[in-house]
Amino acid sequence: MDQIEAYLWATPNSRRVTILFEELGLSYHIHAVNIRTGAQFAPEILALNPYGKLPIVTWIEPEQKAGHEAGQRHVLWESGAILIRFAERFGRFLPDDAMARDAVMQWLMVALTSVGPMSGQAHHWTELADEKPLAALRHHQGLVARVYRMLDAHLADRPYLAADYSLADIAAYPWIDESAWTGLRLADFPHLFAWHQRIGARPAVQRAMRLPKGARLD
């Protein structure tokens, strides 16, 4: 893969990608797309992803692949798709062994379908919505608390979501790092809290969480 271009903002979904890229030691160029100004709906972004969502990654395949000519720029969006594609390409963070891969995939799906979406909905009611009905807030905080309790119990006797550090941890971490958005205290979930500290101490994660430079959500 050559000339990797990443269209990102300082969101948990974008940071999934920067964490993986930093862990892989890839060289890539970031285009900071300010979602607070609606830049994700600019024509040049919609030409890459008609959904107008981040992250988006493009790259050039130097050799001919099935369905793609050598030198053709490839476009991929959705954070989960990007994580799986690059993990498979570089042979890291997604095991080849079927049982080990299944374990990573099931927890990756928890991160993609529960941790992220539920946290995002809770954040809507804690901060972003003009009106903040208490029933909606409590409902979505309850959904986040449920998945936090599950993760906390699972991490009671293991350091990572699967056997080793994997895509599952990479996908879950940026959303857990923003637990304050949900109105919950991460310290109330001690094993999840310890996992968060453990993942956050990784140098690649620390570099990734500072990217894209200058992009802030507040």
Image (cartoon, rainbow, N blue to C red):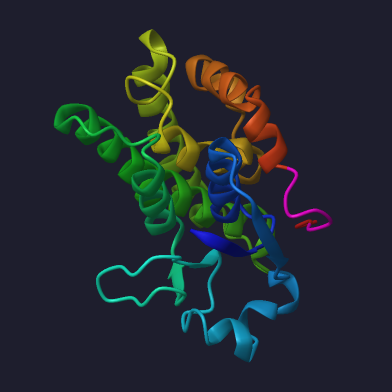
Q: Give me the residue at 44% from left, 31% from top.
A: 148
Q: For the point 65% across and 87% down, which residue is it?
A: 42
Q: 1 above or below 99?
A: below
Q: How many marks?
A: 0
Image check: 111 left or right of 199?
left
Q: Is residue 52 left or right of residue 208?
A: left
The image quadrant that residue 68 belongs to is: bottom left
Residue 194 sits above or below residue 55 on the image: above
* Identity of the residue drawn at 62% across and 60% down: 132
Residue that lies at the very extreme toward the right in this rendered image = 214
- Camera-side residue of 142 and 62: 62
Which residues make up the magenta segment? Answer: 210-215
Where in the figure is residue 209, as x and y percent of width and height? 69, 42
Question: Residue 187 location, x and y as percent?
Answer: 61, 20
Outermost left residue? 98
* Residue 21: in magenta span: no
Q: Nearer the viewer, residue 76 or 146?
A: 76
Q: Position of residue 87 (x, y in %)?
A: 39, 44
Residue farthest along the bottom direction in this orientation: 43
Q: Quadrant of the C terminus?
A: bottom right
Res. 103 image quadrant: top left
Image: 96 above or below 10: above
Where is residue 28? Give x, y as percent. Answer: 64, 56
Above/below status of 129 relative to 204: below
Name the magenta segment's main secondary structure. Answer: loop
- Tell me if 218 is positioned left or right of 81 in this view: right
Q: In the depicted view, which residue is nearer to us: 203 or 173?
A: 203
